[in-house]
Amino acid sequence: MTDDAKAKRTRQLHEYHAQVLRKAILGKESAIEIAVSIPAAANSPQNETHGKPMNQNDAHHDEKIRVLILAEACNSKWSSVPLVGYNQIQALARRRDLEVTLVTHIRNRESFLDDPIVPLLKGLEFIDSDRIARPMYRLGQLLRGGKSLGWTTNMALAWPGYVYFEYLVWKRFGAAIRDRKFDLIHRVTPVSPTLPSPIAGWSPVPFVVGPLNGGLAWPKEFPELKKGEREWLIPLRRAYRRLPWHTKMRRSAAMILAGSRSTAAEMEDVSPDRLKYMPENGFDFRLLEGVDTCRDELSRGDRPLKLISVARLVPYKALDIAMEALAGCRKSWSQWTIVGDGPLRESLERKAEELGIADRIVWTGWVEQKEVIRKLVEADVLVQPSLREFGGGAVLEAMACGTVPLIVDYGGPAELVAPGTGITLPMAPRAELVRSSKTAIEELQRNKSQLSEMSAAAIRHVREHLTWEAKAGELASSYQRLTAANRDRSH
């Protein structure tokens, strides 16, 4: 088969898949546009992608703000960044004052089958950038020794694939953006500040990026962590600032959202009027519908605590420290559920056997978010002593469920846990952190009234400040301000 024939066949397959996806998700009568974009053959005229940019001729109805959202990672079935992207976009799409068109990677296509977000969107586009992204991902896995370690290496190798993703987005939507068929563009994911957005410098309409999160220093109390996490490129991390489009993005973006204090501190070249602090995570209380959240028994009797951790089993999550602490206060707890998996699972299981607490630990591996929520509600305390955490989504979910978090006062989790909503332990060397964790568990078990008060306060704090809906409202206000200022400048 010739190269031209292969390219034609690939296009036919993608067009067919788009039609099948449309019917599976929406049926025949929906007006929502769903398409799949792939890079054209190298010898095709102007390297065009198939079809025309969706919605480019739509009128601006009812004064809604027409938002083009870029979310290379957006998947309700996965955890971490893809789920963060999905949840934030769903909350934005639910707003009546916004008209949202979503652009994401083709790897997320199956997750949108029967997904409730789709009818809320004006358009949905899948971009296939795997020509570059896939080989770089495979190289990253080889250098990292798997999927869970070497995050800096992963981000360095993600750079070419993401830049290519935005190039294809521009090929698809550039004409519509230049003609101002969208009022604003918002890159929601990726969240790494090391990955630039070329479109920020090309777009005539306001470009928002973030929340960006990263750059948290490795704790000096644990110098061995960098080696354990295979972070060989840490000394070169700041080199990303010299890569193409990075400076242009920071200068051109109408607003940059910083997902943590440490990230905001790295944005010294961004003027304060364009920099906004907004934690990357949020919670949707609809996840608790149909779940019995009654915690009346929490304040009764002296029963042992039910504990839970939700984490990748990697060195910086510090579950080995938690094990040593819990081995020293066995009377204070009866069961510890560990949700998650990773390269340290076997060594942690051996350690639990050595410490004599293996029979009290339940290992679930990864489970869907609904099941995570159910298990959080069944527990009293989230034991999450992460030593270097950017976001802390599991901590936020626990608080929303009334599960009191026990964390180290460093990084993202510490920015989520307000006074009276959980226990924050000072960062300290290993032996001291084991002691403080043990003491905290013993105190929580003895003082059930304090535990009950913290549980209620945690729920209130999330409901009032940290829901996806509240964040979407805050973003919509920013969109309104930015688009109004852009119209004034245009006139």
Image (spheres, rainbow, N blue to C red):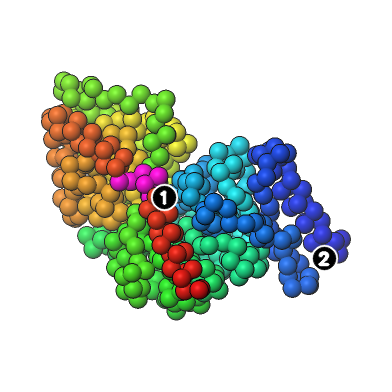
Please count the marks in the image. Answer: 2
Q: Which residue is mark 1?
A: 472
- Mark 1 is surrounded, within 10 Å at the Cα level, by few (under 14), some (14 to 19) or many (20 or more) other residues, namely many
Residue 117, image quadrant: top right
Please provide percent x and percent y for residue 144: 48, 60
Residue type marked 2: Asp
User: Depth check: 181 or 467 in front?
Assistant: 181
In the rendered image, the quadrant that contains the N terminus is bottom right
At 74% across and 73% down in the image, what residue appears?
46
Q: Can you give x and y, in whole percent of width and height, for residue 211 in the image?
A: 40, 58
Image point (47%, 36%), residue name: 368
Badge 2 element: helix
State whether residue 405 appears in this view.
Answer: no
Which residue is pictured at 33% across the width and 73% down the height?
Answer: 271
In the image, the segment drawn in magenta is 465-471
Q: Residue at 75% of width from left, 52% of height from top?
A: 15
Quick one: label 2 or label 1, which is nearer the N terminus? 2
Nearest-to-viewer mark from 2 and 1: 1
- The amino acid at mark 1 is Ala
Residue 470 appears in the picture as rendered:
yes
Determine whether, in the image, residue 95 is placed left or right of residue 273.
right
Residue 466 sits inside the magenta stretch: yes
Residue underneath mark 2: 3
Quarter assignment of residue 395: top left
